[in-house]
Amino acid sequence: HVQLVESGGGSVEAGGSLRLSCTVSGNVFSFNSVGWFRQAPGKRREWVVRKTSTGNTIYKASVQGRFSISRDNAKNTIELQMNRLEPEDTAVYYCNVGYGDYGDLREAWGQGTLVTVSS
């Protein structure tokens, strides 16, 4: 069982930066994938970035070059550095991890943290 808690959201002007953090706890120590999703007001949740256990990292085209995902194993966190923020980045951001073996694949979600970017 895995628990995720996001932090670091807030309000920022366009062009600014924020760093989101996702604290991971539970009795699972390796993940098939880690990533971040977001849900803007009135829209469906969408994928932002995904990093697999094999080392592949894929970013949504609109955030490529501006956002960067990283893991801090000492702190047991998954970080999302967001630079050159745009009003279109306004959303609730969710941390996500996938774990388990084939036939018993699972995923966990955090509760979300709100990011507001003003023009």
Image: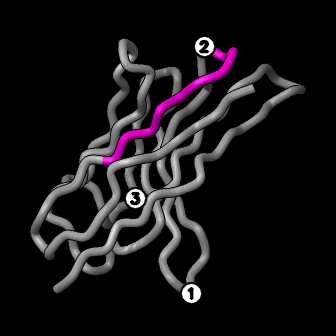
Position of the N terminus by quadrant:
top right
Residue nearest the viewer, comparing 84 with 10: 10
Single out the mark in the foreground, 3 or 1. Answer: 1
Image x and y of residue 95, in percent? 52, 46
57 vs 81, left or right, is: right
Q: Which residue is mark 3?
A: 60
68 vs 42, left or right, is: left
Q: Amino acid at mark 1?
A: Gly
Image x and y of residue 86, in percent? 22, 74
Q: Which residue is mark 2?
A: 29
Judged from this view, the residue extending furthest toward the left is 15
**Local SS, label 3:** loop
Q: Which residue is mark 1?
A: 42
Cα distance, mark 3 to mark 2? Answer: 27 Å
Give the prevailing secondary structure in the magenta stretch: strand
Q: Amino acid at mark 3?
A: Lys
83 vs 52, left or right, is: left
Compared to residue 106, the image places residue 26 above or below, namely above
| Circle 1/circle 2 CB separation < 8 Å | no
Give the mark, 3 or 2, whose residue is nearer the N terminus: 2
Residue nearest the viewer, comparing 64 with 80: 80
Compared to residue 75, the image places residue 58 above or below, namely below
Report crowding for label 2: few under 14, some 14 to 19, many 20 or more residues within 10 A (C-alpha).
few
Position of the C terminus by quadrant:
bottom left
Report crowding for label 3: few under 14, some 14 to 19, many 20 or more residues within 10 A (C-alpha).
some
Q: Amino acid at mark 2?
A: Phe
**Local SS, label 2:** loop
